[in-house]
Amino acid sequence: MPKKSGVAIVVGSFHKNECETMLAAAAGAIKERGMTLRAVVRVPGSYEKPLATKRLLQRDDVDAVVVLGIIEHGETAHGRVMGQSVSDALVNMQLEFMKPIGIGIIGPEVFPTQIQPRLVGHAVAAVAAVEVMLVGAESPYEV
């Protein structure tokens, strides 16, 4: 188990019921893995997730962040642009802060019928990614 185990969650509220399911799954996975949930920050949508994440990464008690949400298929390219912008910002923050970010955002381009089956899996996978990176930060792979 990694020594650094303070994890925070950023979750969107646009798809409130679905995101609450994701939040519960992620919080459970954090606890099951022996990590500590330090904070939960709810934001209106995906564009707000990078700023909330950056604020959390600046905290000394937060070693990793899990970001959850849904970007549905729309009639325009808005969702694709949002998804690319948000994922780019989150990946860049991992490198800036050298702290892992587990991205559990369903979509973009997900259809309403595809959301429910993905909720728990995406949330738990984001926590698992953070766990692997926290352990990897403490035990570098040998060449």
Image (tube, rainbow, N blue to C red):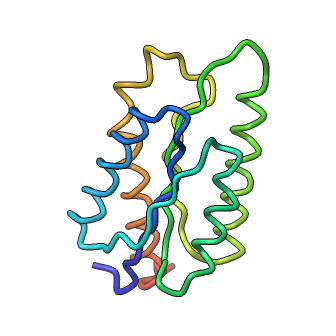
- Where residue 28 sits, quadrant-wise, is bottom left
Identify the residue at image location x=40%, y=66%: 132
Residue most toward the left? 32
Q: Position of residue 37 (x, y in %)?
A: 35, 69
Q: Is residue 88 left or right of residue 137?
A: right
- Where residue 91 sits, quadrant-wise, is bottom right
Front-most of residues 118 and 42 = 42
Number of numbered labels in the structure image = 0
Q: Where is residue 26 in the image (x, y as percent from the top left)?
A: 34, 53
Front-most of residues 76 and 1 = 76
Identify the residue at image location x=39%, y=31%: 118
- Where residue 40 sits, quadrant-wise, is bottom left
Identify the residue at image location x=73%, y=12%: 75
Q: Position of residue 86 (x, y in %)?
A: 70, 48
Q: Quadrant of the N terminus?
A: bottom left
In this rendering, is residue 21 above or below 140?
above
In this rendering, is residue 55 above or below 83?
below
Q: Where is residue 73 in the image (x, y as percent from the top left)?
A: 63, 19
Front-most of residues 119 and 98 = 119
Identify the residue at image location x=59%, y=24%: 72
